[in-house]
Amino acid sequence: MAGAHSIDHELHVRASAGTIRDAIATRSGLQGWNASSVTGDGAVGGEWVLSYEGGPEFAWRVDRDDSTGVAWTCARGPGDSVGTTVNYAFEPTSDGRTRISVTHAGWPHRQGNFKKCNTLWGAMLFELKRFVEGSKPSPAAADVESGSGGSGP
């Protein structure tokens, strides 16, 4: 079935849901861990445009932004990424951390960009964790991979 495949990742971080939300839903936050070039205002219905040095540019429509999560739909990007959706969910854990669950859904198959994005999400979420926990992040983790013509989430 077309669009039935999802990339799923989860990690626990020592940061509040509000700090995580700000990292995903503000320009300065996204520039801290995702892409060094970010345009847009993050308003629901608007778009974030994430550009990766020497690589692809993505436009993500903001579908939801609240205290429990953020959801985007890919409006522009390479290959079969257009129309896929990303849902970030935040949930407190019993040990005082916050669980971040990320689902990148709507992939037509599990080949090509699906595999590349799965790997990139793992690397980028590590950068998100470093950023929200106050370590020095390495923004645009996908910049390294994007030079190969792959796609960054």
Image (tube, rainbow, N blue to C red):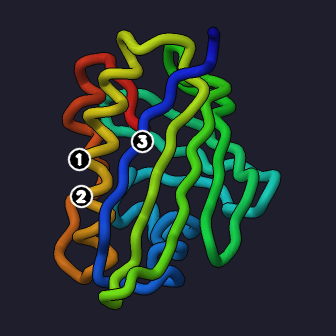
Q: Position of residue 146 (x, y in %)?
A: 29, 28
Secondary structure, mark 1, is helix
Q: Which residue is mark 1?
A: 123
Q: Residues within 10 Å of mark 2 (few under 14, many from 20)?
A: some
Depth check, front residue: 144 or 134: 134
Viewed as shown, does residue 144 lie left or right of 117?
left
Three-letter amino acid code at the position of disc 2: Phe
Using the numbered discs, state the Cα–Cα distance from disc 3 to disc 2 in whole angstroms: 14 Å
Q: Is residue 49 above or below residue 31?
A: above
| Mark 1–mark 2 CB contact (< 8 Å) | yes
Secondary structure, mark 2, is helix
Extreme bottom residue here? Answer: 96
Tell me what residue is drawn at x 56 percent, y 69 percent. 26
Q: Is residue 8 above or below residue 15?
A: above
Looking at the rendered image, the disc whose residue lies closer to the viewer, 3 or 2, is 3
3 or 2: tag closer to the N-terminus: 3
Looking at the rendered image, the disc whose residue lies closer to the viewer, 3 or 1, is 3
| Mark 3–mark 1 CB contact (< 8 Å) | no
Q: Which residue is mark 2?
A: 126
Quick one: quadrant of the C terminus? top left
Q: Which residue is mark 3?
A: 8
Three-letter amino acid code at the position of disc 1: Ala
Viewed as shown, does residue 86 lie left or right of 117?
right
Viewed as shown, does residue 38 lie left or right of 146?
right
Three-letter amino acid code at the position of disc 3: Asp
Quick one: quadrant of the N terminus? top right
Viewed as shown, does residue 141 lie left or right of 102?
left
Tell me what residue is drawn at x 36 percent, y 55 percent. 10
Tell me what residue is drawn at x 43 percent, y 34 percent. 7
